Amino acid sequence: MTLRIAIALHDFSLGGTERIAIRLANQWAADGAEVVVLAGSERGELRRLLDETVMLWVASPPIARRPGSVARLGRAVRRRLAQTPADVLFVPGNYHWPVAAAFRGMARRRRPLIVAQLSNALRKPGRGKLGQFLFEVRTRWRLRDADAIVALSEPDKRLADQLLRRRDVVAIPLPALSASPIPPVPVDPACRLILAAGRFVPQKGFDVLIRAFAIVAQQDERNRLLLVGDGPQRAMLERQIRTLGLTGQVDLPGYVEDLRPCLDRARMFVLPSRFEGYPAVIIEAVAAGRPVVTTACTPAADELLTMGGAGRVVPIEDAEAMAAAILAQLAVPIPDPGALADRVEPFRIDAVARRYEALFRDLLRRERSRIGTGDEHRFDGADGPDVRPDAV
């Protein structure tokens, strides 16, 4: 049976959720599935990463990001899939959860099976008891009609079982790496380059990293910081760099499509985020054989970095602790890049995509058994997805 997989994606802006959704779409299509991305807009730097084997439908008029726009995207996706059905709708990450809620009330025989991904932590520091309670209530409502939920680690799965009060949460590793391993490049012992990457938004904590690097720079003028990415905080970060007198030691080259060449040049990678789900960039750094200094913002910190040499974990918002960890990592012998890379083999896209496909097929078998149909596809009257923009 050929799987028909739809993916809801607001647009192609920079972000880990969008990048991973595109990687999965490309791999599922390569595996023989019929894959269509249902997008609110084609805008964004990641659009060119979508393979031509993946079909694309874009809302007309486009749906721009603003308050309530994800719910509007969900209604557009529902109308589209009522016309051109799919077996499974993949909802990639917390930001897109309102898309799942849009299918409430649609007859089960007519709607796709919905698989939602947990991309960010279900508990965040600073949310408070009332804020956490309201978040959990809202999340259970948004995901009430999801047929399965995917967590990116076993700790996230256990927490989701508890907070969402469900028994259909499965853990599937984050598909952060390509199918073909690239051997790590040895680190030059004289290298003093520290790398960080991501969207320039408050969540990512680059302001804390710059404060930490000001301490690191005082210890050795050879130390350099490379901040790869872009976003609304760029001007603020540039002012901070000038104010701290770091103009000659911090470089902001902008967005790069492939982070690996930057990792090959670096001594280490730093993730200063205030909160994260399971960030792909940590896996990419370890796959490149680079140790990581990260805040305690993600379960990946414990799962990937607790073994000796892989990196260090520091408290969130603590620039002094971050600086101390960076300096300590610079002072120890360079870890074996190949040994680090071996730790993240389970995160290869081909193996992860097959686990998703197995989940999709299992859900379809259960649903066919429940509704008593022997059809090859769950829906009748379905032509292949249309790649032409249509009115919503």
Image (cartoon, rainbow, N blue to C red):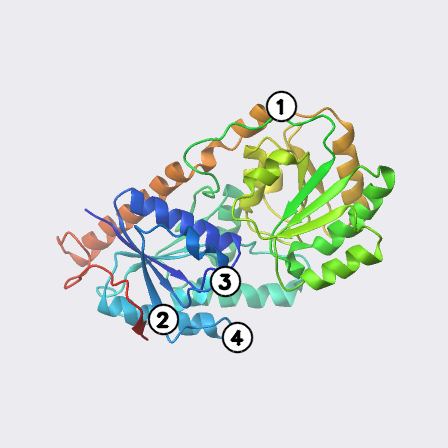
Amino acid beneath label 1: Asp
Res. 59 mark = 2
The residue located at (69%, 45%) in the rendering is 226
**Which numbered disc, 4 or 3, marks the residue that appears first in the sequence?**
4
Q: Name the residue under label 1.
A: 336
Q: Disc 2 versus disc 4: distance between alpha carbons?
A: 17 Å
Q: Name the residue under label 4.
A: 67
Q: What element carries label 1?
A: loop
Q: Position of residue 109 (x, y in %)?
A: 21, 64
Q: Disc 1 versus disc 3: distance between alpha carbons?
A: 37 Å
Residue 313 as seen in the image, left or right of residue 55:
right
The residue located at (47%, 31%) in the rendering is 345
Res. 109 mark = none
Q: Mark 3 points at which residue?
A: 95
Residue 93 as seen in the image, left or right of residue 361:
right
Q: Where is residue 119 in the image (x, y as percent from the top left)?
A: 50, 53
**Which numbered disc, 1 or 3, marks the residue that appears first in the sequence?**
3
Residue sitting nearer the eye, 105 or 347 = 347
**Which numbered disc, 2 or 1, marks the residue that appears first in the sequence?**
2
Q: Which of marks 3 and 2 is in front?
A: 2
Please report contact status of discs 2 and 4: CB closer than 8 Å, yes or no. Answer: no
Amino acid beneath label 2: Ala
In the rendered image, the vertical position of residue 260 relative to residue 22, given as above or below: above
